[in-house]
Image: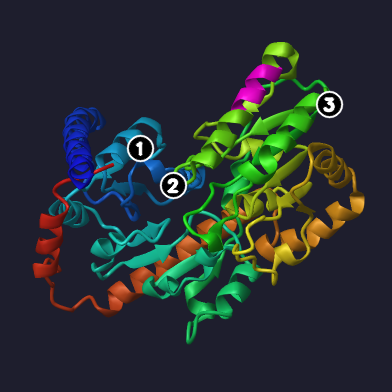
Amino acid sequence: MGLRKDARRAVKLVQNVVRSRRAQARLVEELAKQGPLEPHRYRVGVYFADGKVNLYQLRQWYKPLARLAERHPVLVLSRASGAALALLDEAPLPVAYVRRVADLERVIHEQDLHVVFYVNQNSKNFQMMRYGRRWHVFINHGESDKMYMTTNQFKAYDYALIAGDAARARLDKVLWDYDFDKRAIPIGRPQADHYLDGRALPYPADGREVVLYAPTWEGDRGAAAYGSIASHGVDLVRALLATGRHRVIYRPHPRSGVVDEAYGAANREIVRLIEQANAGDPSAVHVFDQGKDLGWQLAAADVAIVDISAMVYDRLAAGRPLLITRPVSPQAQVDTGGYLSACEWLDAADGSSMLARVDEVAHDPQALERLGYWVERYFGDTSPGVTTERFHAAVDHLMAEWERFAALHATDPDIDEHDAEGEAAEQSDDIEVD
């Protein structure tokens, strides 16, 4: 049994190496098409050390960063070949492939990066963060009340761009001796300014009530078991499809089913139900959404049903009717000190009961009024364009601070930031598995 398992692992390792080599060969071709980067052009870097499976964390920043690049040129630094290939194909920003530490250092020396953004807590972030004389800024990949949002790792960065008052209060409970006034800069949710951006919807405006169901994955531990596909999803979607007056947009987390096969099976059943409903009534145009673009769904849906995840707050920023699925796992940790203390819950039940609850919240003006308080609490002013202005103002402030410190230390001797630790890291990342 052990030998068989070892053999499978060996085969998988060889396959990964072959895929990596092929990806890197394709990447050389794509980078040649992009052409060499103009030296000393880029002032803002976005460091992404993950593979393409986690690109959803960066995709939500494409449009805000593209707008920012109009005033401060932005460069994406990708450590993985698969992610770099995808970024070259889809990102509205130039990409530098920096697989080795030596590659990273070359780009740093060729560019004048004053600010470096990070969207997650990948351990390879520290290979970039060891370079001083620039601001390292955590911008995260969403706003939520999950455990991830109160990590002490915030202290590792010079600054963090946070959503608003709720984020600060959440962190204040956990972080000791953290200078919030200086290091935590509230900007709201700039993505919300781009939710639609003139995009044509994939269905007609025919009077159907559009319901977005966007569940998260099952989680890798009991405390984070927030996913609802297996507990709520099948019965809920079946009931919505049967009414003839609803249109369903189903957007599951891309990792759904990676841990629990039963969860994956429930996900596949929902997809099958949607295909069946569309085949029976093509005018229904129910949507199984696996697209890379997140935003139009949040703005277009008449009511949204989401799990405890960043999707709660992405939808909250739109200020429209919203239900949160209540986790069935007794181990799931729920922060009841913020929006989740007063949100509209959807409990797991039979399809007709959940459908009645959806209709109740979708047409309750008092529920929408209560929602308005929390929109302000989490994001501040969400008037069109305001949060983008706050994002730009925050970056302008960091640029001004960089200039101030650069002037103060103008006579300091040059230093070589390459050291033995960097050499060791370079040796350790020669084989990449995306």
| Residue 375 to residue 356: above or below | below
Q: Nearer the viewer, mark 3 or mark 2?
A: 3
Choose top left, top right, bottom left or bottom right for residue 413. bottom left
The residue closer to the viewer here, 63 or 171, is: 171
Q: Is residue 252 left or right of residue 321?
A: left
The answer to whether residue 274 is magenta is yes
The residue closer to the viewer here, 51 or 129, is: 51
Look at label 2 and name its amino acid. Answer: Leu
**Mark 1 vs mark 2: which is more N-terminal?**
2
Q: Which residue is mark 2?
A: 58
Q: Is residue 250 left or right of residue 236?
A: left
Look at label 1 and name its amino acid. Answer: Leu
**Mark 3 vs mark 1: which is more N-terminal?**
1
| Residue 31 to residue 374: above or below | above
Q: Secondary structure at mark 1?
A: helix
Look at label 3 and name its amino acid. Answer: Thr
The reply to whether dot 3 and dot 2 touch (C-beta < 8 Å) is no
The reply to whether dot 3 and dot 1 touch (C-beta < 8 Å) is no
The reply to whether dot 1 and dot 2 touch (C-beta < 8 Å) is yes
Q: Which mark is residue 370?
A: none
Q: Is residue 128 left or right of residue 292?
A: left
Q: Nearer the viewer, mark 3 or mark 1?
A: 3
Choose top left, top right, bottom left or bottom right for residue 341. bottom right
